[in-house]
Amino acid sequence: MSHSLESFFKPKTIAVVGASKNTTKIGHAALKNILISDYECKVYPINPHEKEILGVKCFKKITDVKVDLDLVLISVPAKTVPKIMLDCVKKNVKNVIIISSGFSEVGNHELEDEVRNIVEKSNIRVLGPNVMGYKNAADGLDASFVYGTARKGTLSLISQSGALGIGMIYLANNEFVGISKIIGVGNKIDIDDDDLIDYFAQDPDTKVIGLYIEAVKDGRAFMNSIKACQKPVLIVKAGRSSAGARATASHTGSMAGSDKIYGAAIKQAGGIRCRDVVELFDMARALAGQPPAQGNRIGIVTNGGGLGILLTDACEANGLRVQKLSDKTYKKIDKILPDLITPNNPIDLSADAGFYRYEAATRALLEDPNIDGIIVASVHGGYARPQEFTGAILKMIRERKLHEEYKKPILATWVGGKEFEDLVWDLKSAGVPIYPSSWRIARSMLALYLEGQRIKKESKKK
Ligand code: ACO
């Protein structure tokens, strides 16, 4: 395991080479992000022309700093990077982030090889080149040059694309998915996806791992890391189509490879493949907030017959089963709910369903041993008050005993407009994953089922 990355993610001393007083420069932004971080460390700006930057004493070169350096960020033009790397070797620096672009991604393989040769002969761990750096929200350190604060949580994200990585921070905040760490890997001359999966696998602040990849350099190491990881690994692999593969080559200079082979290998290793980053966040939200499903038998509670059918179709299309309820559950629901309700699966509570019907039907499904996961759905049909739908779910979520006893995931979905916004917010902030589409909720339930299967397989091995 890459325990060596501990000083990379939790450095006590950090230098920024190319720190600048010029507020438009990346070296300025990188230094500022570290200084405003809610994180205890010593910071050393490096610039040959300045005495201080942002009130912090400046040094002419790395080797002038008297203390040992855990992390160095480099933000100078690409051609200067080999010289800085040699200084880092001399100084015995532990970790380096090369922000600078201008290497293999623009066809400058010679310069990248020169840097790689220096790195390979040293003990330094290097991220990049061509990266944004990372944000360690769990510990409060921002070692990137980009703006944006991630909501603290348990998803650690690895992105081969810097810009997409940044977009994902904002998306995560919007989707109520808390981040532990988010990191751009760029051209991966040293620190690779497998090193990071290994690190996050043993990181107590990470519960779910997500990756955006265009290509992996060492397929075997990548698969082995996913296989060994005891946490869910969600993967968006870009370059599925031949045109997408062409775009990959010009973005990060990497070969997308056969999509079928990638798909089969990810599945075999126990990773979960996501269609896009929105799906990754949908699944991450379910996995971070809900227990995995022990099987694929899904119970649906809804106040709209049409929505129930759409949810059934979406579940079945994704390998989940929406089968008839047992006689025992049938009788229980028949007793507690009015005559007009047919205790089918989906259970149609009818358009005017209020708090009691939602709560009673969901509780009956929790108690049914033939149901592994529950979808609670609401259509704003004009009669029902949406608050009663969310209130019923929140009541059960807050009843910890129910969770501990049944260990079943509850996901929610709705069809409606603005009047649902505050209620969706209430559910999301209580950790209930809620989705605006039948397909998205079914895919997220699938992720919970696959995670349940992975855990079962692991426990059989022991
Ligand atoms: N040691 C220390 N400082 C130095 C050295 C040195 N050897 N040489 C130069 N400097 C100083 C410069 O004097 C300058 O400081 P100043 O503003 O006080 O004069 C500072 O370092 C920066 O050097 P510049 O030559 O001004 O370079 P600039 O900041 O314009 O560009 C950069 C450097 C940002 C690395 C650029 O070359 C680059 O690669 N930009 C792209 C970065 C990027 O996008 N990376 C991918 C991220 S992922 C994503 O897409 C978000």
Image (cartoon, rainbow, N blue to C red):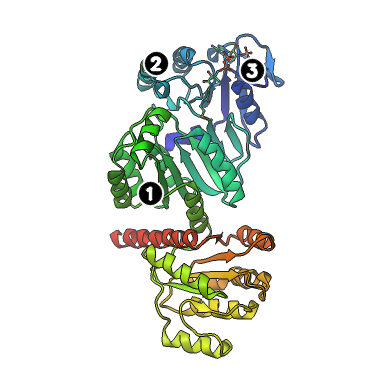
User: What separation in Å lies between label 2 and label 3 (alpha carbons)?
Assistant: 24 Å
Can residue 152 be seen?
no
Between disc 2 and disc 1, whose residue precedes? 2
Disc number placed over residue 20 in the picture, else none: 3
In depth, the one of 116 and 55 nearer the eye is 116
CA–CA distance in space, label 1 to label 3 = 41 Å
How far is mark 2 from mark 1, CA to CA? 34 Å
Say if disc 3 is inside 8 Å of ligand 1. Answer: yes
Give the mark, 2 or 3, whose residue is nearer the N terminus: 3
Q: Quadrant of the N terminus?
A: top left
Residue under label 1? 229
Contact check, label 2 and label 3, Cβ < 8 Å: no
Instruction: Judge whether 247 appears above or below 291 on screen.
Output: above
Mark 2: secondary structure: helix
Q: Where does label 2 land, which residue? A: 111
* Residue drawn at x 52%, y 40% as measured from the top left: 182
- Which quarter of the rendered picture does the C terminus lie within? bottom left
The yes-or-no answer for disc 1 within 8 Å of ligand 1 is no
**Residue mark closest to the camera, 1 vs 3:** 3
**Residue 170 vertical placement versus 84 (above, below):** below
Q: Nearer the viewer, mark 2 or mark 3?
A: 2
383 vs 139: above or below: below
Residue at 50% x, 21% y: name it. 100
